[in-house]
Amino acid sequence: MIKQFTFLGMFLLISSAAMAQQFSPKTAFLEKWENSKNYLLEIAESMPEEQYGFQPTEREMDFKSQLLHIRGNMLWLGTTHFSEEKFDRKALQENIPQTKAATIKVLSEAFDYVLERIKATDEDDFTREVDFFAGRKSKLQILNLLQDHVTHHRGQLIVYLNLNQIEPPRYVGW
């Protein structure tokens, strides 16, 4: 009986540890980030190149600018809070992609950049607080902001597609 209990206890302990690792904030983010990338790239592909300048109102960004804004935010947060590199905001204004294909390429690269920075971040580092314009925030909060910002602007892009009678790609949640 003791041997069975010990084996069962050991199995549960190992299973719990494996599940905790599998469902950590980092692994959950990485899975969601990859799906978010694929979904946004599908949206970017759905809009014809001649409509990349579409903007529903004067106070809103056009389709392409929305994509580049998402990219800039990813590079800013990914660099500033998950690397030792210095973020160069001016570099975003240089070599602005001129085509749909080039825009999608730099957007995809920005997703990959963040993915690699987060993969390289130690799990314990997500509890560390950093200075942020909205006050001190944990790196976990910065992760949430990264995804929330993409979601916010992706929602706008879905409206842009609908306004142009283009059916958006099927939603991907996880």
Image (spheres, rainbow, N blue to C red):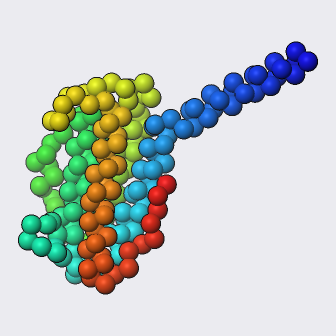
Residue located farthest toward the top when viewing the structure as drawn: 2
| 4 up-or-down from 54: above or below | above
Location of residue 84 in the rendering, given as x and y in whole percent from the top left corner = 26, 30
Regarding residue 173, the answer to whether it shows in the image is yes
Q: What residue is at 32 percent from the left and 32 percent from the top? A: 139
Q: Residue 8 lies in what quarter of the image?
A: top right
Location of residue 149 in the rendering, given as x and y in whole percent from the top left corner = 28, 51
Q: What residue is at 16 percent from the left and 75 percent from the top? A: 56
Tell me: 97 left or right of 165: left
Split into 4 quadrants, where in the image is the N terminus?
top right
| 89 up-or-down from 128: above or below | below
Tell me: 69 left or right of 146: left
Q: What residue is at 25 percent from the left and 55 percent from the top? A: 70
Residue located farthest toward the left when viewing the structure as drawn: 58
Q: What residue is at 35 percent from the left and 69 percent from the top? A: 43
| 90 up-or-down from 119: above or below | below
Residue located farthest toward the bottom when viewing the structure as drawn: 165
Regarding residue 97, the answer to whether it shows in the image is no
Number of numbered labels in the structure image: 0
Residue 143 or residue 117, whichever sits in front: 143
| 102 up-or-down from 36: above or below | below
Residue 67 or residue 134, whichever sits in front: 134
Location of residue 20 in the rendering, given as x and y in whole percent from the top left corner = 57, 32
Location of residue 155 in the rendering, given as x and y in whole percent from the top left corner = 31, 64
Q: Residue 80 lies in what quarter of the image?
A: top left
